Amino acid sequence: MPKHWMLAIASLAAAASLSTLAPARAAAQDAAAPASAAGMKADLLHWVSDAESKLNQLADAMPAAKYSWRPGKGVRSVGEVYMHVATANYGIPSMWGASVPAGFNPQTYEKSLTSKAEVQKALRESFVSLKEKIGALSDADFDRSITMYGSPSTVRNACFLVLTHCHEHLGQSIAYARTNGVVPPWSKPVPAAKPTQ
């Protein structure tokens, strides 16, 4: 048998033996991995933190005079969008029994603050609360039945809702910022390093 054929057969045999080991290795890694709900919780918190960082950066970058800007009649202003996010960050977890700040009213909270400093503070505090509420959930809690907007649901579904809500309004806020000539801080080009002498 030619030598190059023998090498090819040996390579195929080695690949086959590795492929039979791969499922066993993957099973061992799965056994060592945290429970799926715990892993999901970590993923939720990661992406909530992503929205938190970007929304807070935009809220800081937007000039105070633009907080009352709105793209059209009957549409939320810049500040109202941030307050809308804050409202949901408290309101959605309350559906699974999480506490809300004293005096919180989801029907009026969105329009309760208008100054840049107050809105930024409310937005920041709402994300701190949201992350605490998700962080306090146990693995079993994600499967717990709740009622959400009058329909049967689960805590897991409420978590997905609050996460997608944050990112939905992040996209809206990016459009608002760019329309007003504000570049999202995280997307600004990084200045080139100056050559050393």
Image (cartoon, helix red, strand yellow):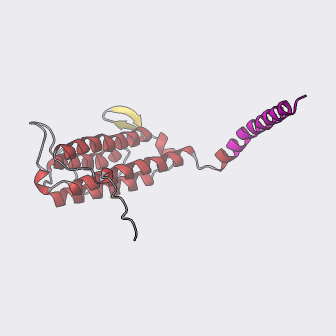
One can see residue 144 in this view: yes
The magenta span reads 1-28
For residue 77: magenta? Answer: no
Q: Nearer the viewer, residue 141 or 79?
A: 79
Image quadrant where one finds the C terminus? bottom left
Q: Nearer the viewer, residue 62 or 5?
A: 5
Q: Nearer the viewer, residue 107 or 65?
A: 65
- At horizontal 39% and vertical 32% (from top left) the residue drawn is 152
- At horizontal 91% and vertical 28% (from top left) the residue drawn is 1
Left or right side of 29 for 96: left
Q: Specify the farthest residue to the right.
A: 1
Q: Specify the farthest residue to the front.
A: 197
Q: Nearer the viewer, residue 147 or 193?
A: 193
x, y percent for residue 182: 20, 50
- At horizontal 83% and vertical 33% (from top left) the residue drawn is 4
x, y percent for residue 25: 71, 44
Helix, strand or loop: magenta stretch = helix
For residue 4: magenta? Answer: yes
x, y percent for residue 185: 28, 54
Q: Please say if 134 is above or below 147.
A: below
Left or right side of 41 for 3: right
